[in-house]
């Protein structure tokens, strides 16, 4: 009897589906249409659906709100504004949450190992919720280093009409301070240059409220890159977190995703190879974070586009750094916002033939169409320099090879640090060991600090080295010490630093074979990083090397270490088996 009844329901449902070929409801109709889906509708009524809502396209709003970090503490209110935009345009908004892990809070601790891992968790969770609940379109709102690429990777995997909304940047702290000011003050205190009372004062005043870290660190770098990619609304990356402009950006995005639904414009139509080239170009001109290399490769992989380290080399050879922004420059993102944000810079790049203007964007228009009416920066501003007077004539993101990094490494060298460094290796098998040595005065001018076993598998999790690099700067050694690692760097790191060294130490890469006292040369012009020992000696060390036992055998970090790819391919966890 039950089988006959259910078969009748299926017959009715199939007849209704035959009549309903509305593309914007491609996924949600499978969840809510037909007699057999009465239980689904019953549950949705409890969360606010009406009879009319079941006839509308459903837009999932993935919010990264939490109170674990100021970067995301306001995103619940932004999600509500996005919902208003979606609903006003005739679709049905459905808000849900995903996680975030704060780099700035977990930095220098074992907890930081979960930071990059969280990118994969966020991507997986967005895929799981919006695919499982049949959302026709998705808007993701992110405001921290890893939830932003995690959001984009989730949108790419689902490949349904989608938009990313940036949570916005924080305002400056007292005396033009920010989070990096606090990290560097720790080094200054350790060097005896400031008293504990001054350190405490900077700690209490540098973070005034909601928003992402204020320089051209990883969050603002990625927000800018995502806008250049075409996946966020014009100027979304250049708005203060707490502002009317950011609220309007959310409403506009909500309306725009309905247009994308109606015209079936998906991430695969936007996230093309040329769009990624636009994102790389803008990242370089802004002096952006080394993390952009890792994340753009991963985001491209998620949509099925091949972006490699070679693309950063190729584009970098012809792209100058022209933004005087922290960490290597003077200005904060909020000050760039005051003069017009990144849109005038993108217009300059387009006019100079350095951007692909024919790339589709989430507005339903091309990049060139979006930029057509954009005015230039005001006269007299000194944040964005002319192309003929750059901070550096080519990219600061220098991809290195050589016998220390045969599969590649990523350095951030603006030229202010010099272009070549030869020094003596001081080797540490964890970030904690390296940081303690710097603070205790064991690291001196002429040293190359080697921090290893911090790669994607070896860490696991590829921690950022902001604490060690900030300690070096705070100690006054910024021009005299280099730091290399198979881990990563925060967008706030500065100095002569090289990360993402591959193969990593855990897999027997050459960085595992470095010994105290070895001579190391880093040459940004020849793009080589060389361990200055004979090939026979390298072979002897390799033969004697033994892989260490995994640091974790159960849980998330263990699972990540078993599945993660090399940093040179984006450190992703869903490569085909």
Image: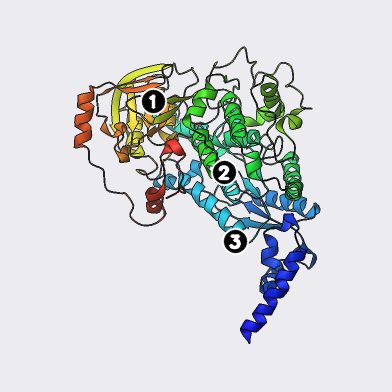
The answer to whether residue 115 is visible is yes
Mark 2 neighbour density, 10 Å: few (under 14) some (14–19) many (20 or more): many
- Residue at the location (63% across, 52% down)? 62
On residue 132, the disc is 3
Of badges 1 and 2, nearer the viewer stands 2
Query: Quick check: marks 2 and 3 in contact, CB under 8 Å?
Result: no
Of the 4 image quadrants, the one containing the N terminus is: bottom right
Q: CA distance from mark 1 to mark 2?
A: 27 Å
Q: Eyeballing the image, is 274 above or below 460? A: above
- Residue at the location (22% across, 22% down)? 534
Which of marks 2 and 1 precedes in the sequence?
Answer: 2
- Residue 81: percent from left, percent from top: 73, 50
Mark 3 neighbour density, 10 Å: few (under 14) some (14–19) many (20 or more): few
- Residue at the location (70% across, 20% down)? 351
Of badges 2 and 3, nearer the viewer stands 2
Frontmost residue, 55 versus 431: 55
Q: CA distance from mark 2 to mark 3?
A: 20 Å
- Residue 342: percent from left, percent from top: 67, 29
Residue at image mark 2: 303
Query: Quick check: marks 1 and 2 in contact, CB under 8 Å?
Result: no
On residue 401, the disc is 1
- Residue at the location (32% across, 49% down)? 551
Query: Quick check: marks 1 and 3 in contact, CB under 8 Å?
Result: no
- Residue 339: percent from left, percent from top: 71, 25
Q: Residue furthest top?
A: 388
């Amino acid at each position: 009897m039950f089988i006959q009844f259910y078969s009748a329901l299926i017959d009715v449902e199939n007849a209704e589906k035959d009549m309903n070929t509305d593309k914007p409801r491609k996924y949600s109709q499978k969840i809510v249409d037909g007699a057999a889906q009465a239980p689904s509708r019953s549950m949705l009524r409890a969360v606010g659906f009406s009879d009319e809502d079941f006839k509308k396209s459903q837009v999932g709003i993935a919010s990264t709100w939490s109170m674990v970090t100021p970067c995301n503490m306001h995103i619940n209110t932004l999600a509500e504004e996005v919902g208003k935009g979606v609903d006003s345009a005739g679709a049905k908004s459905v808000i849900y949450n995903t996680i975030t892990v704060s780099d700035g809070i977990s930095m220098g601790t074992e907890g930081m190992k979960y930071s990059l891992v969280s990118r994969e968790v966020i991507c997986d969770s967005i895929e799981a919720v919006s695919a499982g609940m049949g959302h026709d379109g998705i808007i993701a709102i992110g405001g921290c280093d890893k939830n932003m690429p995690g959001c984009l990777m989730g949108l790419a995997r689902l490949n349904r009409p989608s938009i990313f909304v940036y949570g916005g940047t924080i305002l400056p702290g007292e005396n033009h301070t920010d989070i990096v000011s606090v990290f560097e003050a720790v080094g200054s205190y350790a060097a005896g240059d400031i008293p504990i009372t001054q350190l405490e004062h900077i700690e209490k005043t540098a973070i005034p409220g909601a928003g992402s870290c204020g320089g051209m660190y990883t969050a603002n770098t990625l927000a800018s890159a995502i806008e250049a990619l075409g996946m966020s609304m014009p100027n979304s990356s250049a708005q203060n977190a707490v502002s009317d402009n950011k609220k309007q950006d959310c409403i506009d995005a909500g309306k725009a995703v309905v247009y994308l639904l109606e015209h079936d414009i998906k991430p695969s139509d936007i996230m093309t190879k040329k769009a990624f080239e636009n994102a790389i170009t803008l990242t370089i001109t802004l002096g952006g974070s080394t993390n952009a290399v890792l994340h753009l490769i991963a985001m491209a992989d998620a949509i099925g586009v091949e972006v490699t380290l070679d693309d950063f080399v190729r584009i970098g050879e012809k792209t100058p750094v022209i933004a005087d922004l922290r960490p290597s420059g003077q200005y904060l993102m909020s000050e760039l916002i005051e003069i017009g944000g990144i849109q005038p810079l993108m217009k300059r790049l387009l006019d100079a033939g350095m951007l692909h203007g024919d790339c589709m964007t989430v507005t339903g228009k091309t990049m060139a169409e979006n930029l057509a009416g954009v005015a230039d920066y005001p006269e007299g501003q000194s944040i964005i320099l002319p192309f003929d007077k750059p901070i550096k004539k080519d990219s600061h993101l220098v991809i290195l090879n050589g016998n220390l990094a045969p599969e590649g490494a990523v350095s951030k060298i603006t030229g202010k640090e010099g272009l070549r460094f030869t020094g003596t290796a001081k080797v540490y098998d964890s970030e904690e060991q390296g940081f303690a040595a710097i603070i205790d005065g064991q690291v001196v001018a002429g040293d190359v600090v080697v921090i290893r076993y911090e790669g994607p598998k070896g860490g696991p999790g590829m921690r950022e080295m902001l604490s060690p690099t900030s300690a070096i700067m705070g100690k006054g050694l910024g021009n005299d010490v280099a730091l290399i690692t198979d881990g990563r760097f925060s967008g706030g790191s500065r100095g002569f630093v090289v990360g993402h060294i591959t193969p990593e130490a855990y897999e027997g890469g050459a960085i595992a074979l470095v010994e105290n006292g070895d001579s190391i040369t880093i040459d940004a012009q020849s793009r080589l990083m060389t361990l200055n020992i004979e090939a026979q000696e390298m072979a002897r060390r390799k033969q004697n090397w033994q892989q260490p036992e995994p640091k974790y055998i159960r849980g998330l970090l263990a699972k990540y270490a078993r599945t993660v790819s090399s940093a040179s391919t984006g450190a992703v966890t869903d490569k085909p088996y």
